[in-house]
Amino acid sequence: MTALDAPGQVARLVWTCYEPVHAVTYFHPRARAAYEATGLRGYWRGYFAGRAAPLGPVGPAPVLAAFFTFAPHMVNRALPAVWQLASPEQALRARLTGAVQALAELTYELPERHLAEAAELLEAAAEAVGTAPGRVLGAANAALPRGDYPLARLWQAATTLREHRGDGHVAALVAADLDPVETLAWRVATGMPAQNLLGRGWSEQEWAQARDRLTARGWLTQQPATDLPGTPTARGRAAFQAIEDATDTAAARPWQSLAPESLDRLRTLLTPIAHAAHRVIPADNPIGLPTPQG
């Protein structure tokens, strides 16, 4: 990376390197086992409790707003009921324990000094999130104490930065007047396997209505006399690319606190960790996360 790279371009490139560090919490069996040991049995209980825990023992309303893509009835079923099974403090310990155990299994061949240096540089970027206005999940994670060991520090910094980015992405979607199920329907129309996103609680009718709305605004082609969904139009692709560009731009500030040589060093350090994490992250993952270059 050089000083000539656009800030948004830098933000996207680094995202492909640190997002896999965070994402092991969704895909590694050790992460799920840690939640279950706390009493959070079933994937979605652990997901909602772990991801919402930095906000405290909240009810469904702020989680619906912040997580964005889940149907209300699904969130209402999970919250606040999960706090009867585990407190936010217990959920935070479980999510960090599971993530660290997963990363330890995946990165055991890397020397600790490699992991410690990566954690230090990623924390330097994450420090900028604590003062970033309008980033609720990012700020809540930035306010958590640092871990005692390199992998704990690395995972927490990656989580802070990915939630900061996610806050900006939700803002871009809202500004583009896309609702949650329309956003999911667009992802499926552009090639993401439907089974990756159908578990978020929306009915078949709600999916069909979302596709109809995307067709009406010119994002999907009309399919007369068939039940097949339309395909993305050039207009739709350009409009969603503008959302992605806005997301990248909004995620850029933390990386501006690092010198270009530090960014290059961070990417070098994170790349083997990210490749190791991709051993448990499906190629067609619901995050839309590619394997980093290098």
Image (tube, helix red, strand yellow):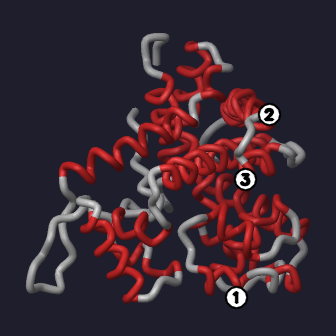
Residue occupying image coordinates x 61% and y 72%: 29
Q: Which residue is mark 3?
A: 137
**On the rendered structure, is 227 left or right of 199?**
left
Earlier residue among tags 2 and 1: 1
Q: Residue furthest front?
A: 216
Residue flagged by tag 2: what amino acid is it?
Answer: Thr
Please tell me how crowded label 2 is: few (under 14), some (14-19), or many (20+) other residues with Cα within 10 Å: few
Residue occupying image coordinates x 66% and y 44%: 164
Secondary-structure class at tag 2 = helix
Q: Which residue is mark 1?
A: 77
Earlier residue among tags 2 and 3: 2
Q: Position of residue 274 (x, y in %)?
A: 52, 44
Q: Are marks 1 and 3 in contact (CB under 8 Å)?
A: no
Q: Which residue is mark 2?
A: 131
Q: Position of residue 126 (x, y in %)?
A: 72, 35
User: Please, is residue 52 above or below residue 237 in the view?
Assistant: below
Q: Are marks 2 and 1 in contact (CB under 8 Å)?
A: no
Residue flagged by tag 1: what amino acid is it?
Answer: Arg
User: Please, is residue 44 above or below residue 186 in the view?
Assistant: below
**Frontmost residue, 16 versus 58:** 58
